[in-house]
Image (cartoon, rainbow, N blue to C red):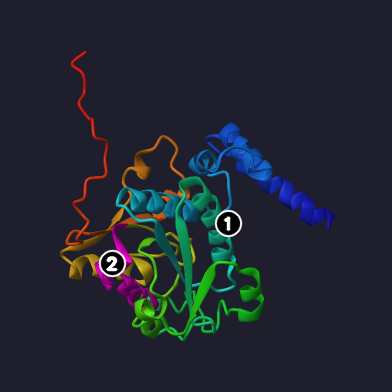
Amino acid sequence: MIKRKLKAGIRIFYNYLFDPYPLRTLAIKILYKLGIGPYPIRLELGAMDRPFYGYCLYHGARLAKKLGHKRISVLEFGVASGRGVVNLEYHAREIARDLSIEIEIYGFDSGEGLPAPRDYRDLPYHWKEGFFKMDFTSLQARLTRTKLVIGNVEETLQDFCQKYNPAPIAAIMMDLDYYSSTVHGMRVFDLPDAYILPRVFCYFDDILGSEVELLNNRTGMRLAMDEFNRDNPDKIISPAHYLLCKKVVELWYHQIFIYHNFKHQQYNDFISGENQQLPLD
């Protein structure tokens, strides 16, 4: 026990030692622990659990309101143990109260864990069949507003709109791990305009990795995204370039992407400031 605590203390020390903004990091952790301040400010600072989930949902909700929508949906593909959808419920409560908008949550998962990898594109050297199996009963008991869509995503997406009649999708969390599964999950972008916003804030989980995964554009989620952009001239999944230009760039900024459907019936609806004239002096 003492050795474990000592190792944890050393790790914390080294984290602060090599942190380029140690005071900022410490302040954010304090705000996170105490829950101080309005939700939008804590979100801007990242002083909360999974700020990337909150970011996508918050800005998706803001866009929806500007387009005249009173309710939205957020989808998580790859629920696993359910920590993600539990976290989404927290963000949904805060955002619904802050922006006065109704939020529906849908979690897509087979419930049985990862299937067998199909080929090298699914990274069989990193993932195994059966990883991330769901305890459906325990998870369902924790949820208050999430609807779990259980089954193969290739099939459940086909009748999703007819079965659930979801509000327009404003945010998507993609965590299906495999290339093959992500390809099926991205068919969500084929839904009719009535069920999805013209621009959607997306978080893609497995695109960075480590020295083990060694992720690249010919495997996994990165390949699925590249193929989507190649095969859909009127749509694109684009990095959030504006985040990558901030003074302090958080790791998860690299995992935020914006889906655009240029042919969407609301794509050209004006949502910006009415007066953008700059004075001469």
Say few, some or many: other residues with alpha carbon within 10 Å of mark 2 (under 14 / 14 to 19 / 20 or more): some
Residue sitting nearer the eye, 34 or 97: 97
Q: Count the numbered circles shown.
A: 2
Magenta highlight range: 181-199
Residue 194, label in figure? 2
- Tell me: 31 left or right of 51: right
- Report the quarter where the N terminus lies: bottom right
Q: Is residue 171 magenta?
A: no
Query: At 17% from the left edge and 62% from the top edge, which residue is drawn?
Result: 263
- Percent across and percent down for residue 91 are 53, 54
Q: Could you give the CA–CA distance between mark 1 and mark 2, rounded to whole angstroms?
A: 26 Å
Which quadrant would residue 206 be assigned to in this image? bottom left
Question: Mark 1 or 2 closer to N-term?
Answer: 1
- For the residues carrying marks 1 and 2, which lies nearer the camera in this image? 2
- Percent across and percent down for residue 238 are 28, 56
Q: Secondary structure at mark 1?
A: helix
Q: Is residue 184 magenta?
A: yes
Instruction: Tell me if residue 148 can be seen.
Output: yes
Task: Look at mark 1 in the image and give the residue it sits on.
Answer: 90
